[in-house]
Structure formats: structure tokens, C-alpha cells
Image (cartoon, rainbow, N blue to C red):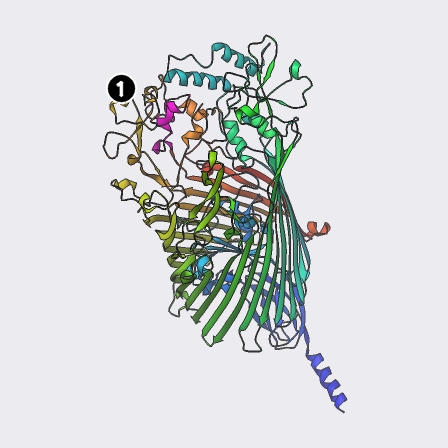
Amino acid sequence: MLLLLMLVFSNAWSQSKITVTGKVTDTLGIKLPGASIVAEGIKNVATSADENGRFVLDVTPGTVLRISFVGFVAQQVTVTSENRSLTIVLKEQKLITDEVVITAFGKKERKEAIVGSVTSVKPAELKIPASNLTSALAGQAAGVIAYQPSGQPGQDNAQFFIRGVTTFGYKRDPLILIDNVELSANDLARLNVDDIASFSILKDASATALYGARGANGVILVSTKEGKEGPVNVSFRSEYSTSQSTQTLNLVDPIQYMTLYNEASLTRDPRLPLPFTQTDINGVKATLDKAPGYNPYLYPAVDWLGLLFKKRASTQRNNLNISGGGKAARYYIAGAYNLDNGVLNEDIRNNNNNNVKFRNYQLRANVNVNVTPTTEVVVRLSGLFNEYNGPVTTDGSFASDLYNVAIHTSPVLFPAYFEPDAANANAQHILFGNVATATSNNDNSVLYNNPYANLLRGHKNSSESRMSAQFELNQDLRFITDGLKFKSIFSTNRYSYFQSQLAYNPFYYSIDKTSEDYKLNWINNQPAASGRSGATEYLQYNRSEPNANTFMYLQTALEYNKAFGDHNISSTLIGTAQQTVYSSAIDPRTNTTTLQYSLPYRNLGLAGRLTYSYKSKYFTELNFGLNGSERFNVQHRYGFFPTIGASWVASNESFWNVSFVDRLKIRASYGLVGNDAIGSQRFFYQSDVLLNDGGNYAQFGINNQYERKGVVIRNYENPNVTWETSRQTNIAIEATLFRNFNIIAEFYKNHRYDILQSLDGTRIPSSEGLEAGISSNLGKVNSKGVDLSLDYKQIFSKDLSASIRGNFTYSTNKYEYLLEPNYAESWRHFIGQPISRGYGYIAERLFVDDQEARNSPTQIFDASSSSANLPRGGDIKYRDLNNDGKIDYLDQAFIGYPTTPEIVYGFGFSTVYKGFDISAFFQGQARVSFFINPNKVSPFIPSDEAYIYGNTQVLSDFANDHWSEENQNLYALYPRLGTTRNSVTNNLQPSTWWLRDGSFMRLKQAEIGYTLPSRLSKSMKLKSLRIYFNGLNLLTWSPFKMWDPELGGNGFAYPIQKVFNLGILANL
């Protein structure tokens, strides 16, 4: 009987079910595949829209269906027998109140609920045709100041700061965390953008408070992608780029070089014979013209930059990722390979093939496993491997040194190499050109740099790797109480570095000008007399000691979230511990091994956050960070950093009726955060003592036959040294206007105090008897500024949409206090000045003539200079600020803007029409100055860098606009020429004459792409296929024209690259 009743009721119920069909689109009729359709209150009755936005579902009449899609307002529909065919039109959710943002320790929070200053950058906005992610940061986010000082592959990291430079202490850049673990700027630079799920910038005290003693400089928080439930998705990206210098240095040709050299000699001392005779000039001209009988060895004319560097380089980037999974487990696996080639010529004589090659390999695997319905285990494995190959340079700074050497080598002094003469017909080595500065060919006490020899003499290899394993446990503790969760992270990574080189010492020759036959003299054949290394035909192997550092990190957290009607509270308590062990144990100040530096670096932390909100209108937040470091004495070992914040969403009030303001939010925060990276000294409460120092010793006995080494105190203890602290205030307003226009404006102030200042001999009287310096928390800096970000998006039709975005940052700082002498001259004080502002003389103009120079205040900067080297007409005239009748260090003052830009901005647009898309982004900076270093750019004189010996070439700008007897322009670009350092010492002083405006605006990136129609991609067995062409650093507008202004004063460095790139993105 019971079975019969069950069959009857079952039959009745099945007969009452109806089949509902429907289609889900947006307001423009665009289908929404993947939209979710769920029967409210009925388990396991749900489906999703197919690729055409259609769905089929069997339900009973009266069932309420909830249709939702990410980014759109969910809609509910009640099913009846009459409306079995549904057309669901979802409205786009244009307001950002439901946007999820990743905040401190990886917590996901609604944008509306955030009290602190957090800026999210979309990963797609960081995708540029470059292998270095940091080069994309400039202008991308309000509050971030970034610039790139070099374009060399592997050495092209950008310098970046959050809300400017706010300390003159040891560490100024932000804390960087990838998947909640602290890593370096190099790790961020090599992170593959395709692997990034979120990129957040935490800027104020409330946002960074949980990091306590590490949050004062701001925080960059990156999360990598994880697998999602669904079928396997395979994505492949491949790019090929060509690059060239954004701006080429223009040098004069050899003839003009010789002519100007003669002018420089004549204008300083007309009694001396000219360095180059007309015969020399005619001979070089014949070499350039390859006239009959020309002799390139006797009359060389070398284009060193053209010989060493080619116009373009190539780059390859490839990335493959696979993701998918089910309810129990999900995975994301990715691999990448990047190859950046340098612009060094691969010469036929170069057996070492030492053009710059930077290879980068990346592997990443993130696996999420639901062990139980309330327990999730996450495993993250990653490996980063970098390989560098390049020339063996003089100063060890990779290939960038070759630019310096080439520009500081005369084009007419000697050829790059000689063909063998009769005596060297069987030589197995290259006969590199050079000249000895002494009269004897056998005395090579000083040899000039031969850039060609530096290029060919050998190659340098370096390899570095970072392997990381991270394990996470996410436990829902609802069985204890609803809303309680536990999370734990353990991470370990190992960084290793190794460098080696193979090189020979070049054979240098000069042509014997006294011989009628072609004869060469070997000029570095007596190294013992000169102290130089002798020439070798064999490769010498040198290597560095392997460097391996180990880092371990443990984090545990409890989180509680609860809603009580209109009230919401949440709390978080987090404990952290980390340890770093450096195998090298090198003191960075002295480059020596010490016991102190071999000990592990350890930090402990406890952080907490309590938030409360009411009706999504009022939000408050309390945070604290309690951190401990063994670098400080026990009385100062722990630091406590509290913050408070609040916000009001005025647009959620019932009285709000401003029709065009859809959302208005006001927020503010105040609190303390710290900085524990305040110096290189290992333990501030212990003196650093070096026993058996060879520099200090005593000798005794007959003929001083016995020796005992002494003791050196390298740093004195100060048990009162403590954390650097930042007191921060932030006020912001957020608004959405006309549903499409979003604006965020923020004002902030930062008072940094207890900045560690090293007190050296200039600040401590010698009567104290101290042998070394001592450090103390004395410094104070005030900074303030404004952040502004705007974005606008408009969908015109199902085929056409457009968006624009922009941001602006203005950040200033000044010394409030540091220990300095009580200068009688007010203009010499640091207090009140910006941190990185230049310091030098005020140049009024050039002297009219020798008589004015003699009658002006004395300008002698080299006491050993003879009267022939005193300032003359055409030399720089400086202002005597203290009116004492002489120009000296007392007349130096702060000049120009800081060398770190105070204004940084960026703006761009993107448009999509059917399958085509086009975008462009501009970036710029202002209120920034830099010095041209006259010691590097002044024609003919050697560089001030000890490893370079040669005659500096002449920049065309100086050749075209310099003071001369025929062009007595008192405001010429370059003053009177000279051939020796002593003759131009007056003009080599830091002054406003060499100060330049570093502002510029750049077309940072432009891109055009095309996505194939789905029918075509499906015919190729692909889900989608996009082809695109883009460029980087395409155009630059700046008042400075000599080199790329982003290089600042480092104009002879490896140039920043302009990139043209072709890529494809396929989803399988």
C-alpha cells in the first residue's frame, strides 16, 4: 500500500513539472554564456547558459529562478505555465560597490567596505612588450612614483616608491609580497603578468598597519592565479619583439673632433703646438673617404659606438598555462621562457659570442584541494631561473660599462686592431690598438681603454634561481561558531647566485711611426715594471663564491565575520615569524666575512584588525601591528603600531537624492607604521670589532722582525637605536558620477621620525677619541601630497565600447630635522629642503673676457693649479653668496627640483569595435631635475671614473653651441673648451650650469589587436585567437634633447629601449 501511494504521488509530481527555456543577454542584446540559473530554495536544480546564452531547465510552476552573471545585476523570475520561454536581460553593474579588492595578508574585501587607501591595478594594464614587470609601473597607479634608469636586459629594474621618498634612511622602496610572502624587487620584475590574478597597492597607515614595522614605505601585494572549477583551459601566448634605443647619442665625426681639439688647445695656451697637424687631419679624412693610399692604422678614424653596438636587438617571450578542475581539486600550471638579446655586435673575431643574452625560465603550479567541505589545502610551487651572458667589462657592471668606455675613447688616437705585420704574421691573438702615454714603448704605466678589446676579450656568465614551496591551510570553523575561520601558511624559498668569467688579457700594439715599413710595437710586454697584467693567449677562469640564501615564513590567522541585522563586525588576528639565512655572511659595508652576518635574521609579528559597519553606510576600523626584531636591544626590540580609520557612504543615506552622483564615499585614516630596515649594521646594540686587522699593527724586535696585528672598531654600539616610525594621515573622497565616471581624490601627510643617522668624523669632535662612526635615531622628515585617479567607460552598442583612465600624483617632502653643523650661511642648511634636491653653485653666466675673470671674486677650485689654469673669458662665473670675495664651498646652495619627480601622471584610452581593439597609454613626470656630470661629458678630458682612461668624445650639442673666440655667447650650452682637467676645473663644479629639467611625457604604449570570430577560431580547434601589434616607449616629449630624460644624469648608460612587438594569444 505504501509503495502504491509513493508511485501515485511521484507520478503526480512529475506531471506537474514543466520545461523552461530561456536566453540571457545584456541590455544591448549581447549573449552572456555561462550565466548562472538557480532555482531558489531547491537543491540541485540549477544550470548555466550555453555559448549562445541559452538554457533549459525542468521546474515546477511557481519556482523562483535567480539569474546572475559576474559584473551584472542579478534578476529573479517566477515561473508559470504561461511563461515557459524566457528572455532575461541583465543590467550591467556599473557601480564599484561590489568590486572585490585584495588587502593586507591577502584578504578579499568589498571596495565599498575598505577604509584605507588601496589601489588595484588590472593585470591587463601591466601587460607591456617587455620581460620586466617593474618597467610597466610608471604612471599606472595614483601614488606610485617610478622611473627606469637603464635599458640593459637583466639590469633594467625600475626604481619605484609609494607616495614618493619619505625618508633619507636605508630603505625607501615598498614592501613587496607575492602570495603573502615577502620577496624582492627582482622577483616582482620577473613575475609573468599572465600569472597575476590581482595587483594591489597599499598606501596609507590603515591599509598597511597589519605589516607594522615593515609597512612605512607602502606595500605592493600580488596574488597569482588559481584554478577554477570547470573544463580544462589551455592558454598560450607568444611574442617576438625588436628594440632600439629611444634616443641615440650624437657625437661629432673624427674631423670635427680633431678641429675642436685644436681649438681647445689654442684657446687655453696659444704658445703650444697644435695637437693635430693638417697632415693628421688630411690623413684621417682620407681614411674616412677611403681615398687612394689611405692608411687606417697611421690615421685611424674609429666609430667606436658603431663598432661595438648594432641598431636593433630582438626579444622572445613565450608563456603557456593550463587550468581547470572540479569541486574536489583545482589547478593552475604555468611555464614561461623569455630571451632578451642585447645590442652588442657579434664580431667575426669574437669567438666568445658575448653579446648580452638574458634568459628567464619560470615554472608555477598552484593546486587547491578541498579535503573536506570545510577544509581546503593549497600548494604553491614556483621556480625562477635567470641566466646572463655578456662581455667582461672593466668595472664589473655588465654591458653598461661599454657605453662609458666607448664614449670616453678618442676616435683618432689608435685603431681598434691591427693586421699582423711581418714580425707577427703567425700570431694567434688579435693585435689590439693602443698607445702608451710614456715616451718609451716598453713603459706601459698607463694604457688607454680599447673598447673593442673589452668587447672581445672574454665573456661573463651569471645564473640565479629562486625556488619556492608554499603550503596553506584554510579551515572553516563553523562547527565552533558561524563566521569563524582559520588560515595558516608555511613558505620556504631558496635563492642562489653564481658568477664566472673566462677572459684573456689583450695584446696591445702601436704602429712604429719612425719606420718606413709597416711595423708594430708590442706595448704591454713588461707587466712587472708597470704593475699591469701581462698579455695572455689563454683564457683565465675566475668565479665568485656560490651564494645561497634561505628564507622561511610562517603565518597563522584567525578571522571572524558576523552580521547582526544591520550591523556587521569582523576581526582578524595574525601571527607571523620569518627567518633568513645568508650563506655569504658578507658585511655590505666592508665586503668582508664576519660572524655577526652569518647569524640568521629573525622577525616576529602579531597583527590585528577589528571592523564595524552599519547598513553599509558607516564603517570603522582599528588595526595594530606588534613586531619584534633581534637587531635591536631588548628594551627596543618590539614596536607597537596602531591605526584607526572610518568612512561614510553618503550615497547610501535615505535622504540622498543627487541624481547624477550615484555613489559618494568619504574616508579618513590616522596611525603609525614602522620601518625596521634602517641600516646595514647587524646588531645596533653591539660594537663591530675586527681582530687582527692588517692595517693596524705594531712592530718590534731587531729590525722589526716581530709584528702583532691590531684591533679595529668599525662601528660603536648604541643600545637606544630603535625603529623608524611614520605617523600618517589620509583623507579621501570617492565618487561615481553619471554611473560611468569614477573619481578618487586623496590628500595625505606623513611625518617620519627616528630616522637613523650615521654620525661620522665630520659631526663628532676628534677630542672624543672615537675611531669610527656611531648611529642614532635623530632624523625627521615631513611629506605630503595628493593622489587623483579617474576612469570612464561607455558601451555604445553591442559592437562598440570605449574607456579612458588617468591618474595624477603630487608628492613633496622636506627635512624637518637632522644633525648638521650650525652653518652661518642659511642657504647651506638641509632642514627645510627636499630630500634629493641638488646642491651646488649658482652659475650666473660665462665670463665676458679675461679681465672680468680677474676682477671677479676668486674662483680657485684646485690649489695646485698654475696661473695658466685660472678662469678666463668663456669660463663659468659663479655667484658669491656670502660676499667674501671668493667662491668656495660656503657659496654652495640647494638648487633645482629634487632628482626624484614630485609629479607623476598617466592617462590612456581603449576602444573595442567588433573584433578590433586599439589602446594607448601616456606617462610623464614633472618637477624633477638632474645634473649633467661635467666630469663625464666634458670633451677631451678623461672621465673621473678610475677604471676609464681615455679622451672623452664630443657631443654634437656641445660642438654646435660652445663659447669660442668667434662665438662669445655668454649663455652658450658649453663653456670654453680645454684639453686637460686642470684647465677646465672651474667648469667641472656642480652648479646650475649643469642642472637640467627632467620632465617629460612619453607615449608609453600603444596597441592594436584583432580577435577572430568564434566560428573561425572553432574551425581551428581553438576557443579564441587574438593577434596584436604593440609598441613601448614610442614617442617622447621633453625640453631635454641630449639623451633620454628618464636616464637622468646617467646619459652614458645602456639606453632605454623602444620596442615593437608582434604577439598571439590562443585559448584551446
How dense is the environment of label 1, judged by Cα within 10 Å: few (below 14), some, or many (20 and up)?
A: few
Q: Amino acid at mark 1?
A: Gln
Q: Is residue 1029 above or below residue 478?
A: above
Residue at point 58% right, 78% down? 479
Horizontally, residue 196 falls left or right of residue 826, namely right
Q: Main secondary structure of the magenta part?
A: loop
Return the x and y of residue 901 as percentages of the image width and height.
41, 44
Q: Which residues are magenta?
A: 969-994
Of the pair 195 and 496, the residue shown nearer to us: 496
Query: Residue 98, how many percent across, how many down?
Result: 50, 64
User: Which of 276/689 is in front?
Assistant: 689
Tell me where residue 621 appears, x and y as whole percent.
Answer: 42, 67
Residue on which disc 1 sits: 851
Q: Quadrant of residue 963?
A: top left
* 828 sits left or right of 97 in the view: left
For the N terminus, which image quadrant? bottom right
